[in-house]
Amino acid sequence: MASSQDPLLKEEEEAMENHSDMDVEMGDIPERQNLPSLSVMSTARSIITVVILAFVNLLIYANRSSMAGVLPYIQKAYDTNASLSGLLNTLFIGSYVLVAPIAGYLGDHCNKKYTICTGVIIWLSMTLTLSFIPDGYFLLFLLTSGLVGAGEATFCTIAPSIIADLFTSHQRTRMLNVFYSVIPVGCGLGYIIGPKVTDAARGDWHWAFRVTPGLGLIAVALMILVTKEPPRATTNGKNNKSPKFAKWTTDLKKLFKNQSFMLTTLGSSAVSFIVGAIGVWGPSYLTYARILLQEKDPCHAEQCDYHDILIFGVITVVSGILGVVAGSEISKRYRKSNPRADPLVCGCAMMLSAPFLLLALTFGDISLVATNIFIFIGETLLSVNFTLISDIILKVVTPWRRSSALAVQMTIYHLLGDAGSPYLIGLISDTYEQGYAKSPLLKYRSLEYALMTCTIMAVIGGAFFMATALFIERDEKEAEMESEPPSSSSSSLLSADEDRASDYRDP
């Protein structure tokens, strides 16, 4: 450890005390690698940065669920069946999957602030373009929605790693809670805002995609003016900067050998599958159930009152916030007695969600009140995983692989999860309907049976999280050892640099 009289250490401490905004490049001088400071950014600026990132995250998920909220209008405008409607989400996630690894690499080796701003600008411009595509041009609408996913991927891949660089330990978990707790709020608001804006525009659903771009521009301006590029922090809070041009193949090999990372990623894929399927088809299922119970006639008008979509939105908001907060608090307390708490809590929550999802489907043609209650409980249990998944991944990988790790995780869980689940549910529903006369009962039953695949995925996902608990302690210790700053002695530093030379190439 560097001496307390070291002028470099004094300079860094003064920067912390004065909340200087200068960008300090850590790791260039050997003594600086042992500094205990996390960042030269002030605590207030760090918190503001998290708030801005959370606001963008809120807008992204509100915009995404707006499409599900106005899906009945889109189906009418383009005369599409269930499988084609599900393909919208599949292509959107497909572009997300392709861009996420590139964004992760850029996030680890380039300026995170400007990379993330570029992604948000792409997302905003494509969303606005989407709102001007006239009826009848479904292919153009499909392709543009895919480009929206490309912009989202850049933001969602890098944002959590910025938070991880700004905070450590329990503070990191709290800030990730803030970031991820807005996801269900955004989803719920999208279900509410989409139909309401469409109603206000006299049935013109295009206006549902013109709300978030304006607010997003404000967020971009705040990111440029307020946020600063944080130095990469190690797992224990000390600054550490890896060589700038790491071999991506080396990072991938390390990640794929990390059992906790891979098992958590597979578990999160099951969560993504369920959330994607329910998010797209949940409102339609409730609408068909209400029609079947003769509480409402099928809508054939140009402008319909999709009241159940609003109810579903409220359920999503409340259950999401409750699940994220409950999961974090339960895990934090359980962690005091069991270091494997995070994956165990995720696994239990996933397995417990399965019977409630099944009950929600079983009671659809009996009682909508009971159905909504079971959906609420099931979504609450699923939301328990949101923060804990990222927390696990950030703890079992080294700092200079965080963006890449999140990118790989997002690529896999979208590819195996919500990239295909809405389309698969729609395809199963369409297949079931073939050969039968169209009726409200048939639409309800076909969607009911298709959504039952979600209960199977809940059990499978829970098993993956339980398996993660077997390896998390070992992998977390390995990540800490790999990211530990080298000794202050020059010989140790040279030895460490030589050991890493094989993993990196010169610029």
Image (spheres, rainbow, N blue to C red):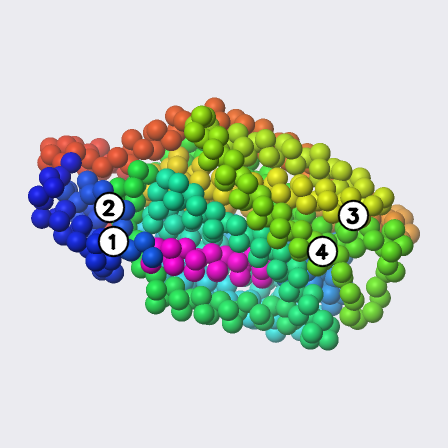
Question: Please, what secondary structure does the residue beneath circle 3 have?
Answer: helix
Q: Which residue is mark 4?
A: 311
Residue 52 on the magenta span: yes
Give the residues in magenta. Answer: 45-64
Q: In the rendered structure, are the residues bearing label 2 and label 4 in contact, judged by CB atoms less than 8 Å apart?
A: no
Residue 246 image point, x, y percent: 30, 44
Residue under pointer 2: 37
Q: Please state which amino acid type lies under the numbered disc 3.
A: Val
Q: Residues within 10 Å of mark 3 (few under 14, many from 20)?
A: few
Mark 1 or 3: the one toward you: 3
Return the mark for residue 40.
1
Q: Is residue 447 visible?
A: no
Q: Vertical placement of 129 versus 373: above or below?
A: below
Left or right placement of residue 140 versus residue 289 in this view: left
Residue annotated with mark 3: 369
**Is residue 495 placed above or below 125 in the rendered structure?**
above
